[in-house]
Image: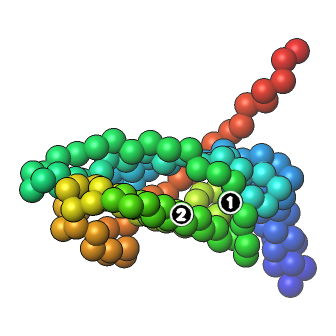
């Protein structure tokens, strides 16, 4: 029995050393089918996030592609989860995005969805070619996973 207790304490101590502390900065980089992501986490928030992907577009009945690359603002982490959504509506233009995920000690997993449209002439979105402004959030979102990487100090000697 003492041997089992000693092994359990050793395993817990090792896991505590491997898990990032709440104040430490962590860098996560990764990808999924058709998407690349980067996150920087510190003090219980994702203070930097970058998403790069290719959008499928229909412009005046013709199919095409457009690049999407954007840095998003800071996102609070609650119970290991984060989510940012944004919508823009103007006459003749609209855009929506959703980035959500779960932060684990060694990885971040999540999904990303984006759609923009210009009147009745053009619509661009993640994953599938779509008719004008029809929202299929679950079907058209891109899944990703990002692993934790070492963070190099930015201070000079």
The Cα–Cα distance between marks 1 and 2, rounded to whole angstroms, is 12 Å
- The secondary structure type at the circle numbered 1 is strand
Question: The residue tagged with tag 2: helix, strand or loop?
Answer: strand
- Residue 106 drawn at (x, y percent): 64, 56
Find residue 22 and report its horizontal and vertical position in percent: 84, 58
Compared with residue 31, is residue 45 higher up or lower down, i.e. above or below? below
Q: Is residue 103 left or right of residue 98?
A: right
**Side (left or right) of 84 relative to 135:** right
Where residue 127 appears, x then y in whole percent? 28, 60
Look at mark 1 in the image and give the residue it sits on: 75
Query: Residue shown at 33%/41% (left/top)?
Result: 67
Residue drawn at the location 74% of the way across and 58% of the way down: 45
Quarter of the image containing the N terminus? bottom right
Q: Residue furthest top?
A: 157
Q: Nearer the viewer, residue 11 or 123?
A: 123
Checking the image for residue 86, the label placed there is 2
Q: Nearer the viewer, residue 148 or 116?
A: 116
């Amino acid at each position: 029995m003492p041997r089992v207790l000693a092994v359990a304490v050793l395993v817990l101590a090792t896991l505590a050393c491997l898990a990032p502390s709440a104040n430490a900065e962590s860098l996560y980089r990764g990808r999924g089918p058709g998407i690349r992501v980067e996150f920087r986490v510190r003090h219980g928030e994702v203070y930097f996030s970058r998403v790069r992907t290719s959008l499928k577009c229909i412009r005046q009945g013709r199919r095409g592609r457009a690049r999407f690359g954007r840095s998003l603002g800071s996102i609070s982490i609650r119970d290991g989860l984060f989510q940012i959504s944004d919508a823009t509506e103007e006459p003749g233009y609209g855009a929506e995005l959703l980035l959500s995920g779960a932060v684990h000690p060694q990885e971040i997993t999540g999904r990303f969805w984006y759609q923009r449209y210009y009147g009745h002439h053009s619509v661009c979105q993640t994953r599938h070619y779509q008719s004008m402004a029809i929202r299929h959030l679950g079907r058209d979102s891109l899944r990703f996973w990002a692993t934790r990487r070492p963070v190099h100090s930015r201070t000079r000697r």
